[in-house]
Image (cartoon, rainbow, N blue to C red):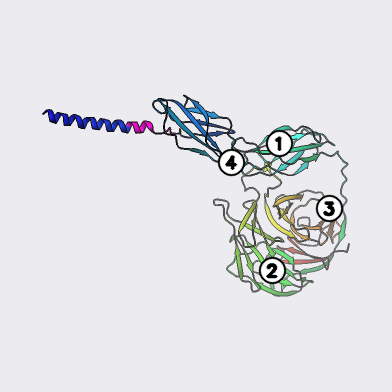
Amino acid sequence: MKSGSRNVEFVILSVLLTALLAVGDVLAAGPVWMPGFPLRAGATVILMWGPVPGATEYKLLKKTGEADFKEVYKGPMNNFSDPDAPSTVTIEYKVVPVVKGKEGDPSSAAVLKGIEPLKSPTFTGFLTASDTITVRWTNPPGSMFFNLYRADKKGGAFALVGSIQQETYTDRNVKKGTTYYYQVTAVDRNNTESKKSPVLEAVLKEEVKVVELKEVVKKVVSRGAVSGEDLYEFVQPNFVGVLKDGRVYVVDRTSIQYLDKDGKYLSRLNLDPKWSPPNGAAVDRDGKMLLAFLAEKVVRKIDESGKAVETFSYPPLGGKFVNNPNYVAVDGDGNYWITDGVRFQVVKLDPAGKQVEVLGRLRGAYDFKTKKETDFPGVGKIYYNPYDGKLYVVLGVDAVVRVVDPKTSRVVKTFGGIGPNLDQFSGVGGLAFRKNGNILVLDHLSQTVKEFSKDYKYLATYADVLEKKPSRLSTNFPSGLGFNEELNRFYVLSTLGNVVYVFDIPNG
């Protein structure tokens, strides 16, 4: 019995010793980081780890970049705030417990990767009103808000104007005739501020006397109206244009008809009857026709036989924001620009048909009172001007024309708008361009064509009915405009009248 008891005691001691060794292993394990720690707070890192039983103090080791680990804290607390932790540098931390004067196993390394420095914004320009200056700038990736600074004299000290969430600010604390100097920075989610932008100089000019525009009416000569092929007249035509060889093309619901310079029928290109009626049209760099099909949500490039050789589309957003390709234009680099009247956007595709950019805020994404110059509410038609290399986007609701630089995708000018003034419109039916850089705008409700200079100033009004005021063209609901520079000839389309009116304009 004694021998058996000893064996039992030995087994019990062995079990207890194994258990103690296991507990010892647990106690010897390194500290564990508390959930969510280490935590960045600007240039400070807050560290907290779980206590180790028996530990009387802890050593916190830090490694910055490629350097070795160095001790930055030694003490009894199981937390520490490191004030010297720039977010742009990768930092590692380890904690070593000290138990009964001996160092235990270290914790796992906590790595905080360096954040790429936030790029500085750059100013994109400024606008002045009667008593304000509005400055605009870019939005670098990672920006949460912006700090705008201003100096009232060159070389003077810059003071903070305010912290702003949008990329625009209207400065109302300005005086006429004074030049102001602005700089802007971006601030990221860690409250880290970028370097300051280059200085923007802006001046609110002294008020000048407004010179009322004087109407300049140039009488055009009517050459009559044409209806297309005999017995196969136009059916609700919606686009007219002039090719490089002088031929006029008219796009209607089912075909494209080609006319000579005088409007005489030449040929017809029948479209696939399975297709919906096309909307806008343009000519590609290779001379092929591009047609936008709103109902089918695609743009087709067709060959001389009327067959589609390529089809372009862009990703839908889902929900109520279905694709709505109203019009299409092709810039000098072969990119395709499609207006979407449902989304309030202009979609850019590269020559391969891949979406590369979207301009404008979504419909419903903003109150109309917060409209920006880069918004496109009521967007409809778009044209490419080969003589100045710019895109002209028509906002149908406001009768506004926005000029977009295709190289930067930015609005560089806005002109027009609904109103009775000579440089305003009742509605925009179409645009055409002159080789000297001037812009021709069909005001379809006033039944006139207005000419603007290359810097968007009103020059003249074209009409053939001058006996009554206001002067007008002898047309019926004009809705499209083509122009032959060599002949100084307008081709004015009427969708409701199913005709094209031909007018010669005076030289000069």
Q: Earlier in the sequence, mark 1 or mark 3?
A: 1
Q: CA distance from mark 4 to mark 2?
A: 47 Å
Q: Are marks 1 and 4 in contact (CB under 8 Å)?
A: no
Q: Earlier in the sequence, mark 3 or mark 4?
A: 4
From the top left corner, tell me how far across and down residue 475 is, in percent: 78, 62
Q: Residues within 10 Å of mark 4 (few under 14, many from 20)?
A: few
The residue shown at (21%, 30%) is 12
On the question of residue 481 being in view, the answer is yes
Q: Which residue is mark 2?
A: 286
* Vertical side of 214 occupied by 152: above or below: above
From the top left corner, tell me how far across and down residue 98 is, in percent: 43, 27
Which amino acid is tagged 4? Answer: Ile
Identify the secondary structure beneath mark 1. strand
Q: Which residues are magenta?
A: 23-32
Checking the image for residue 458, the label placed there is: 3
The residue shown at (73%, 35%) is 149
Checking the image for residue 148, the label placed there is: 1
254 or 332: nearer the viewer: 332
Mark 1 vs mark 3: give the one in front: 1
Identify the secondary structure beneath mark 2. loop
Identify the secondary structure beneath mark 4. loop
Q: Which residue is mark 4?
A: 115
Mark 2 vs mark 3: give the one in front: 2
In the image, is residue 405 part of the stretch drawn in magenta?
no
Identify the secondary structure beneath mark 3. strand
